[in-house]
Amino acid sequence: MFYSFCKTQIFIRAGSRISPTSQCFSNHPVVSFTVRWASKIVGDEHSFTVSYLINSCGLSPDSALSVSKRMQFETSEKPDSVISFFKNHGFSKTQIRDLIKRRPKLLLAVPDKTLLPKFQYFYSKGISRSELARILSSYPRVLEYNLDKNIIPRFNFFKELTHCDDKKVFLAYKNCPMILTYDLKSVFASNLAFLRDIGVPESIIMTKLVVHPRIFARNHDKFRRYTEEVKKLGFNPSKQLFLIALQSLTEISRSTWERKSNIFKQCGWTDKDIVSAFEKNPRCMTFSEQKIIATMNFLVNTMDFKPSFIANCPYLLSYSLERRIIPRCSVLQALVSHGLIKEFNVFSVLACTETKFLQRFVTPYEDLNLLKLYNGKQGLSH
């Protein structure tokens, strides 16, 4: 316990060479410890790097220690200039922390030479400062690639391939960073050609390619196997649901499929129900196990729906249990208990907008304080 305490506290100030910018991330009072303690934990040669990563970048002690094993610097000159650059381009403290945690070597960049030209290029494509900061803080890898040799050619390739505008190319990058950091021409070409050969319409391919390009960036042999599995399940290649099913299969392993199938069986589904549900809503097999169990438990045990009914309407599982299913079903139960409604179509109730739901089931019954019940149930999720 004592070691853990020292490990956390020593990083607030492990030496005397802390950058003036360090206070921007830490409001803690400076705690004086000798360099001898820092040396025991991270070594003299790493102590300044660790201190800087915590105080100037906002990293946790554990993250800072991990980064210091792969990268060190002796002064704050370069890192300070990098942090100032990101601040000047609208990055928040949290975004800077996330970016540095993911790509710490960017602290050693020369901003005007290696970062600014890339930012100017993205700005020229209509990407706003706030949007750029939000995306790059989560997916900063592209900043380590050469602008002329890698980024621009790959940006143009994807734009020409999909016939989409510049903003949508960047949206695709957010969903699949590898489109600007890998040479995907050969991979994309063979997989797209295969989809065309089996009858998937070009319009459906291009729409999915922009929103979920990762599906198409797989090894061609694996891609073919996944596609054949989708066909065997009875999905029509000419329909949009075909690629949704393909996406779902590529996102989960066989062991995960079997594990979730067993969960659905424990909730009352048969093998036939599972296949039927997947055919109607392929995304149902990508939900977390916790979500599946909690939602099925509420719908079956609280709302008294038969498991087979849910399998026949698997989109019910898509809605948020805390923010939509429980609040709306609680209102419906209250109306039924007062004899104000006898039956309802739960799918229609959950699918309608909040405005329509309130107008139809809450506002006409002010005496029952249903709005208070509705808002109270929603509040349970916060």
Image (tube, helix red, strand yellow):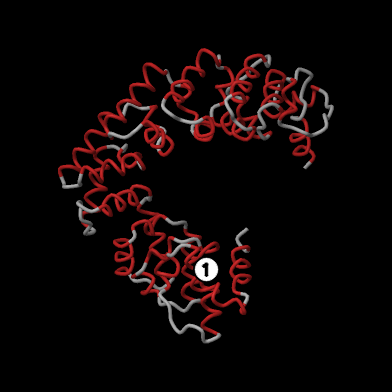
Left or right of 36 in this view: 151: left
Who's the residue at 57% across and 23% down the image? Answer: 70
Left or right of 63 in this view: 156: left
Q: Quadrant of the C terminus?
A: bottom right
Residue 315, horizontal then vertical, whole percent: 38, 63
Q: Please, what secondary structure does the residue beneath circle 1 have?
A: helix
Who's the residue at 33% across and 51% down the image? Answer: 249
Who's the residue at 73% across and 25% down the image? Answer: 22
Q: Which residue is mark 1?
A: 358
| Label 1 neighbour load within 10 Å: few <14, some 14-19, many 20+ | some
Quarter of the view holding residue 344: bottom left
What type is the residue that disc 1 sits on?
Leu
Q: Quadrant of the N terminus?
A: top right
Picture mark count? 1
Quarter of the view holding residue 205: top left
What is the residue that sits farthest to the bottom in this orientation? 339
Residue 119 or 315: which is nearer the viewer? Answer: 119
Who's the residue at 82% across and 29% down the image? Answer: 30
Residue 270 or 248: which is nearer the viewer? Answer: 248
On screen, residue 173 above or below 147 = below
Residue 143, horizontal then vertical, whole percent: 48, 23
